Amino acid sequence: MAVSTDLKALLSPEVLSLTVAEKLPWDKHAAIDFSEAIDWTFFGGALHGTPHQFITAEKEAFLHQKTLSALKLLASIGLAYMDMPHLLETLLPPPADTSFLEQALGLQLILDQAPRKLLGGPLDDRWVYGYFGELSAALAQQLRALPGAQSPHNWARWKDSVSLDYFVWARVWFAAPIVHHESLAHEAVAMTEELRVIVESECEGGARDPYRDLPDEARWDLYGFPRMLEARRGPSKGANGKSSVTAGCFWICALLDVHYPILEKYGRYPYRNSVLGRASTLDEEEWLQKAKLFKSPSPEVVKRIKADVEAGRWSPIGAEV
């Protein structure tokens, strides 16, 4: 790939490590208050009680500049010409290397999360879901296909260097691209179940995810995802006012799982239709009205994206309507 050298310069080991530090700013060895961490991660809250270390503003600016440049370079290649195995070999150390876990997590976060944060143009949501979502899912599947001893999903690879709390967050971000992809619903549920089992088995005295015991209509609620987001309520808290790794992990698994019934019914996420140039069915329109949480772009943006899709082209990242 002709751009490999440029990508490697942009997505250096330092950039991949900073990406992880920005998204997982907690002490790798300490317990994490999951109520606070979930509020910060999903709802824009602040971190106070949980040990954490944010990167400096200077490093954050450096990280965002390098990452945005890398995203634009990746966008110039085109999905049909992306050689993912070669990309992995270029950007990541060998899977057996001790640095592989953090570096692979950094690359996964850049493809899945960075576009959502850094691409703010009126037409850029198509890039987020229709382009980088595909790349991120491809990377996630390749990482998932690694043998157990090499897999970044394997708790045994992490447990001597991080707490179970930190591992849960790493594992969540490895699973996120699978959950976000419209064609991998069953695999997404399998991944949350794997994480749930790890936490249940690691906790002293045993632990059972209470969401397992909910009736199907509650656990697989078609409106569960927007309702959990709208409620802005995290996991239950203990006597110390904090949420444990069990409560936190089980809540996050529930949040990831309630994506499944949407895909099971519609085969896609209706709230993405307008930014992917798709027409919604009457059933999808009804779901969107009841879900309430998802806003459609302006008619001008919808029209432009539809024209781009029909013409087989992509407006540049950051383009105006």
Image (cartoon, rainbow, N blue to C red):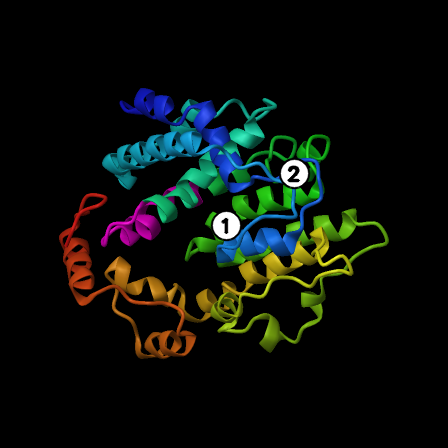
Quadrant of the frame with the N terminus = top left
Does dot 2 land on a helix, a strand or a loop?
A: loop
User: Residue under circle 2?
Assistant: 154
Q: How far apart are marks 1 and 2 (CA)?
A: 16 Å
Residue kind at label 2, given as amino acid type: Asn
Q: Would you say 57 lies left or right of 302 here?
A: right
User: Residue under circle 1?
Assistant: 176
Q: Using a 10 Å C-alpha cutoff, classify the residue at mark 1 as few (fewer than 14 neighbours), some (14 to 19) or many (20 or more).
A: many
Q: Judge whether 74 appears above or below 270 on screen.
A: above
The answer to whether residue 319 is seen in the rendering is yes
| Region of the chain picked out in magenta, as a range | 119-139
Q: Would you say 207 lies left or right of 145 here?
A: right
Give the quarter of the image for residue 82: top left
Please name the residue shown 56% across and 56% down the image: 39
Check if residue 121 falls in the magenta segment: yes
Residue kind at label 1, given as amino acid type: Ala
